[in-house]
Amino acid sequence: MQFPMPHFFSVSLLISLLLFSNFSLCFSQDYIIGGGGGGGGGDDDDEAKPAAPPPEQNQCNGIFLSYTFISREKELPRLKNATAQSWAFKSEAVILNAGLTELKAWKMFIGFHHHEILVSANGAVVMDGSDFPVDVGNGTTLAGYPMTDLKTSIETAGDINQIQATVEFTGTQFGIKPPGVPMPKTIRLENDGFKCPAPRHRGKRTMHVCCKKDPKFKVKKEKKTKFFARQNGDLSLTYDVMQAYGNNYLAQVTIDNNNPLGRLDHWNLTWEWMRGEFIQSMRGAYTHTRDLSQCVYGTAGQYYQDFDFSQVMSCDKRPIIADLPADRINDDKVGKLPYCCRNGSLLPTLMDESKARSIFQLQVYKLPPDMNRTALNPPQKWKISGVLNPKYVCAAPLRVEPTEFPDPSGLQSTSTSIASWQIICNITRPKVKQSKCCVSFSAYYNDSVIPCNTCACGCDDIDTDTCNPNAHSMLLPPEALLVPFSNRSAKARAWAKIKHYRNPKKLPCPDNCGVSINWHINSDYTNGWSARLTLFNWEDYPFEDWFTAIQLNKAGRGYENVYSFNGTRLPKIKNTIFLQGLPGLAYLMGEVNGTNPKTDPRVPGKQQSVISFTKKGIRNLDILRGDGFPNKVFFNGEECALPKDIPTASSAHHRSCDVFMSLIFILALTFVFMTDRFH
């Protein structure tokens, strides 16, 4: 076909315009994608993409960590005070295995210090099991999830998806306005056997560090296994999968108390399901709530459309699990499980080894895509707590060798679990004004009692308009220890007036402790000394099988006997005495009404005993100067708050000592003088 010349030029011109137009559009699109926002020149509030990995990454022969600040913007409310203004920020942390060995269960510390509150952390979980949002203003340790292990480049042919993990942060921070950049103080690897130098900065937004194996770290020789060796901790929790099916499995949870001073009463255990699981049934324990609407109206209800959810134990993402009471131990449906049904009591092995373990089982249903019997994922963010017990911080679950169990038939053979994970929880020392018990000091050589510190166990629920939460506690007469704090005001003011102490208009706030302990120096003589320990229970409930531990750094090894308790010197904890109730006296009763409830104050539950000590073999032991007062006191595993001062000897006592020493000195001089005279 032939086109007339004018038409030919028109068609050619049209084709050319279309071609060049298309080329321009494609070119423009490529420029936008490839530019990455470059050339914008915006401030810190503008959205920015993470910088390219620093060149130091290629020079690292260990574990390479980096932290990159991406962007932030002002949050409401808008304030003129820069330190009070909140900013929503985004950042990113990267951990890369550039070494020769696989990094299992990686843990990374980020030293946040701008009052940061993390709202989300995609790719990791907070090690202490805290829920988002979580305050990380003092720094936080993160564990990898779902990517817990980082393989080497050698065994993956350099697959970046298997050797590197990225954590994307979203949160709030305070105190720094543009152009300042709120970077952490430090970043480091928390896995054992690695040493990290101080991180380096690349520009204002990126910091990085290369952590290498510590040549001084001694690795225990263990048989090479596919999984981690069992770890040691104050509390060991094991999550064993006993039976596995396509859409569900049977798990057993074992809780072991390994600390000689650790304890839990009425324990509550919680975790977080990360893949939509729910608990169909339980044996040996139960959940506090049964909100089935989360299953019926959630993803589980969409998948299991013909499922009867009325019998489901828990659909909560974060179930709260508790031990069954003792009367359910022989129940055919929920009991008949060894080490179950003790109402949540976990005692130290020193008291009763058979009561240092707790076990329960649960049937777990899964959701797609985990619909085969080998798709097994333990819950994360484990937490466990008791009534008046130490605070435990739990690590992330570690895959360990399958647990071995004796054959139920009684034959001399063992069976193993399908899969096992271990969760280690360790006791943390209580922060100031966050204890659950406290100690008061008194002595025979001083009339006054030094009571528990003001707000020793917190003053969050106290009206501080009527009391001073920061005042020094006032000295008391001994009988005031038997009176609830709300009834001590008159006694405290009267004692201050008699002794000419300071008598403030606004009295110090109470200690708010459920249990208080009085340590009284009873006597002091040439070869020994004695003290009296008194326990006061201000709670409404009793403490069964209570114990207390007293640590005396200098005088503890002189322990001789305790007369109304059962006492033992702990061999593995230096200078510590372990005390518990005698058979039949193991109950520390709760607070009860006075003789006349209308006029008399309530009376605390009380037990006391005298403890004797010897001075033999202990040099320079001075009871009057404070060597007889404990350095640490524990009640049911919780470390109690100690007074800031100790009783001092009265001036009369000091004068008598001075007179006695002066008399000896004069007699010695007289003797020398007379001897010289006779010679």
Image (cartoon, grey):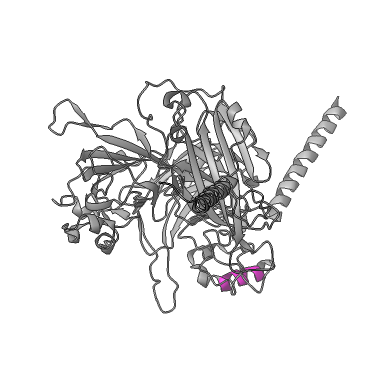
Q: Is residue 492 magenta?
A: yes
Residue 582 percent coordinates (x, y)? 35, 47
- Is residue 506 inside the magenta stretch? no
Expressed as whole percent of the image width and height from the top left, the position of residue 474 reads 62, 64
Q: Give the range drawn in magenta.
A: 489-497
Q: Which of 532 and 180 is in front in this view?
A: 180
Residue visible at 40% across and 71% down in the picture: 594
Tally the numbered discs: 0
Q: Can residue 332 be seen in this view?
A: yes
Looking at the rendering, in which quadrant would you find the C terminus?
Answer: top right
Q: In this rendered view, identify the residue nearer to me: 287 or 428.
A: 287
- Horizontally, is 185 left or right of 26 in the view? right
Q: Is the magenta region chiefly helix, strand or loop?
A: helix
Residue 430 in the image, given as x and y percentages of width and height: 52, 51
Q: Can residue 196 be seen in this view?
A: no
Which residue is rendered at x = 17% and y = 57% of the image?
307
109 vs 130, left or right, is right
Q: Residue at x 48, y 68 (%)?
A: 484
Q: Quadrant of residue 314?
A: bottom left
Q: Which of these two is toward me, 599 or 310?
A: 310
